[in-house]
Image: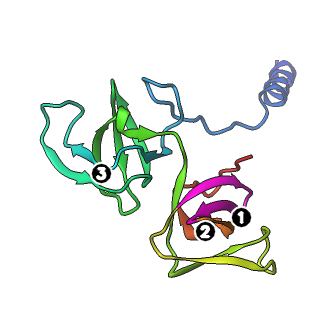
């Protein structure tokens, strides 16, 4: 009897393979949660709950600001900014276009994704840049007419393990 159990166990382990972490998905869009988006509007009311009847806590006033969606309910998305402040925003105020905010005092934009590459520009802390492709450690950005590669660990608006083509 033990022989049959042992063979069954080996077959199950072999077939199952490594278990991957299950990605949480939004109930409305079926997109991953959390995920990054940006503000489409110049101004957006941030509410306490997912409806017009909920109180406005504050107003986001920066177009293209990166935000993290943490929940969905109907036409509403719960978002947070880089400081963790957030609330519920109507989905029409958000865009799937990706942006990031620089977090270091000075973020150099390199010509290539290496520390030794020439620097095309230097971005100050808090600059919002368009996000292009990303490798494990670097992301291609464009801001103020400049383009280049910045280290991912100095940016907010892109996941540390995110790869973009």
* Nearer-the-camera pick, 37 or 121: 121
User: In what quadrant of the picture does the N terminus appear?
Assistant: top right
For residue 8, the mark is none
Q: How far apart in space, not on screen, are marks 2 and 3 (Cα)?
A: 23 Å
Q: Residue at x 52, y 77 (%)?
A: 104
**Element on which disc 3 rests:** strand
The tag earlier along the polypeptide, 3 or 1, is: 3
Q: Quadrant of residue 2?
A: top right
Most foreground residue, 99 or 14: 99
Q: Position of residue 93 (x, y in %)?
A: 35, 39
Q: Which mark is residue 137?
A: 1
* 41 in the magenta segment: no
Residue at left offset 70%, top offset 55%:
134
Which residue is labeled 3 in the image? 86
- Give the residue pinned by disc 2: 153
- In the image, residue 150 sits, relative to residue 22, either above or below, namely below
Q: Nearer the viewer, residue 150 or 162?
A: 150
Question: Between disc 2 and disc 3, whose residue precedes?
Answer: 3
Magenta region? 129-144
Position of 56 compared to 14: left or right? left
Measured in 3D between alpha carbons, the distance from the residue under mark 3 to the one under mark 1, in whole angstroms, is 28 Å
Which quadrant of the figure has residue 77?
A: top left
* Residue contact between numbered discs 3 and 1, judged by CB atoms under 8 Å: no
Q: Are marks 1 and 2 in contact (CB under 8 Å)?
A: yes
Label 1 or label 2, whichever comes before in sequence order: 1
Q: Indicate the position of residue 70 as horizontal and vertical percent values.
A: 41, 42
């Amino acid at each position: 009897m033990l022989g049959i159990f042992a063979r069954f166990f080996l077959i199950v382990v072999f077939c199952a393979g490594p278990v991957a972490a299950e990605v949480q998905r939004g109930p409305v869009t079926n997109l991953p949660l959390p995920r990054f988006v940006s503000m489409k509007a110049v101004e957006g009311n941030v509410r306490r709950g997912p409806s017009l009847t909920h109180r406005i806590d504050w107003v986001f006033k920066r177009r293209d600001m990166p935000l993290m969606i943490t929940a969905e309910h109907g036409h509403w998305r719960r978002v947070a900014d880089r400081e963790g402040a957030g609330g519920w925003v109507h989905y029409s105020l958000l865009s799937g276009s990706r942006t990031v905010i620089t977090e270091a005092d000075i973020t150099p934009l390199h010509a290539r994704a290496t520390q030794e590459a020439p620097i095309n520009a230097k971005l100050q802390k808090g600059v919002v840049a368009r996000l292009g492709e990303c490798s494990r450690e670097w992301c291609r950005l464009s801001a103020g007419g400049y383009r280049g590669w910045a280290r991912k660990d100095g940016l907010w608006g892109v996941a540390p393990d995110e790869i973009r083509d």
